[in-house]
């Protein structure tokens, strides 16, 4: 993993946008993996700005989102489809027909999950996968103890995740108990993973992901087996790392 510790989330988001911009310019038909939550919003705003002001062209790109709540309609105010439309797709020139989010209302969930994996495979796999991390170490919605080889699947959410995400809903009881998520095995097939994490409440999860043993108790630690993961974090999220000096020296040498 390459770890870049930035002064602010804004700086980290802009640097992540540089990686995204370079990838889209090098390969206009880029297959982008996308995440929801507060963390990628700075990156998405920067992608929007660069599309509008700098002509960054997404017209030939396609996207696959990591996850969606189970039993939630795409037009529900808290659906991840709606989140993506409102926070990114409506503001860049991507063809919405080529944006994919798992269908939380699929009649046959197993078949839908298999199809989602097949669509990713048929698209040539994800080139750049944007990732956030849950305070319990989840990526997508792969919760602790989830198989590190998992494919797209339905998962039961932890109480901690439901509490963390309750801010997007009127009340905790409204947060769905299940979701559909790309599996960790699916995520590991992406060519580049762009992990973003900000704030002190991510510090334990981030330390486990980067320095902890690979364990299903911290699903993000599986990224230690991925050969091109770039981590952009702020000071607070980096506060529990032991090898801080090493990351800074390596980053300075790389930049
Ligand atoms: C949700 C999403 C994850 C995301 C996580 C962190 O659970 N399924 O993909 O990384 O939240 O969210 P936030 O960025 O809001 O902290």
Image: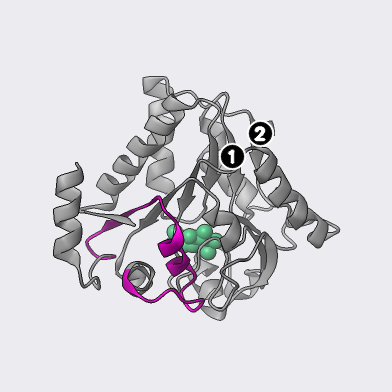
In the visual, does 193 lie left or right of 159?
left
Distance Cα–Cα, label 2 vs label 1:
6 Å
Element on which disc 2 rests: helix
Q: Which of the numbered marks, if any, corresponds to residue 98? A: 2
Task: Answer few, some or many: residues within 10 Å of disc 2's Cα (few below 14, many 20 plus, some between 14 and 19).
Answer: few
In the visual, does 149 lie left or right of 138?
right
Tally of numbered discs: 2
Give percent across and percent down for residue 64.
61, 44
Residue in front for this viewpoint, 106 or 232: 232
Asked if residue 8 lies in the magenta stretch, the reply is no
Taking 90 as reference, is 103 above or below it?
A: below
In the visual, does 91 lie left or right of 102?
left
Find out whether the residues at labels 2 and 1 contact each other: C-beta distance under 8 Å: yes
Q: Which of the numbered marks, if any, corresponds to residue 63? A: 1
Residue 134 in sight here: no
Residue in front for this viewpoint, 54 or 165: 54
Residue in front for this viewpoint, 162 or 251: 251
Q: Residue furthest right?
A: 107
Where residue 135 sits, quadrant-wise, is bottom left
Residue in view at x 51 percent, y 42 percent: 87
Q: Quadrant of the N terminus?
A: bottom left
Q: Which residues are magenta?
A: 211-237
Residue in view at x 58 percent, y 25 percent: 60
Asked if residue 217 lies in the magenta stretch, the reply is yes
Q: Which of the numbered marks, if any, corresponds to residue 235? A: none
Give the mark, 2 or 1, whose residue is nearer the N terminus: 1
């Amino acid at each position: 993993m390459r770890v870049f510790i930035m002064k602010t989330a804004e700086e980290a988001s802009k640097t992540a946008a540089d990686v995204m911009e370079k990838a889209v310019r090098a390969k206009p038909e880029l297959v982008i993996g996308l995440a929801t939550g507060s963390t990628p919003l700075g990156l998405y705003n920067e992608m929007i700005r660069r599309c509008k002001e700098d002509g960054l062209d997404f017209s030939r790109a396609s996207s696959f989102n990591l996850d969606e709540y189970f039993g939630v309609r795409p037009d529900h105010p808290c659906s991840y489809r709606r989140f993506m439309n409102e926070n990114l797709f409506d503001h860049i020139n991507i063809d919405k027909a080529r944006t994919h989010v798992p269908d939380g209302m699929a009649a046959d969930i197993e078949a839908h999950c298999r199809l989602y994996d097949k669509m990713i495979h048929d698209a040539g796999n994800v080139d750049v996968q944007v990732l956030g991390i849950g305070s319990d170490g989840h990526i997508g919605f792969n919760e602790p103890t989830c198989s590190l080889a998992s494919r797209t699947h339905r998962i039961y959410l932890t109480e901690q995740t439901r509490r963390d995400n309750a801010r997007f809903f009127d009340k905790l009881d409204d947060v769905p108990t299940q979701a559909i998520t790309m599996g960790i095995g699916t995520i590991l097939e992406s060519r580049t993973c762009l992990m973003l994490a900000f704030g002190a409440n991510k510090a334990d999860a981030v330390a486990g992901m980067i320095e902890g043993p690979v364990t299903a108790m911290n699903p993000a630690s599986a990224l230690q087996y991925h050969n091109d993961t770039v981590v952009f974090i702020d000071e607070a999220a980096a506060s529990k790392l032991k090898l801080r000096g090493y990351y800074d020296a390596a980053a300075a040498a790389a930049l």
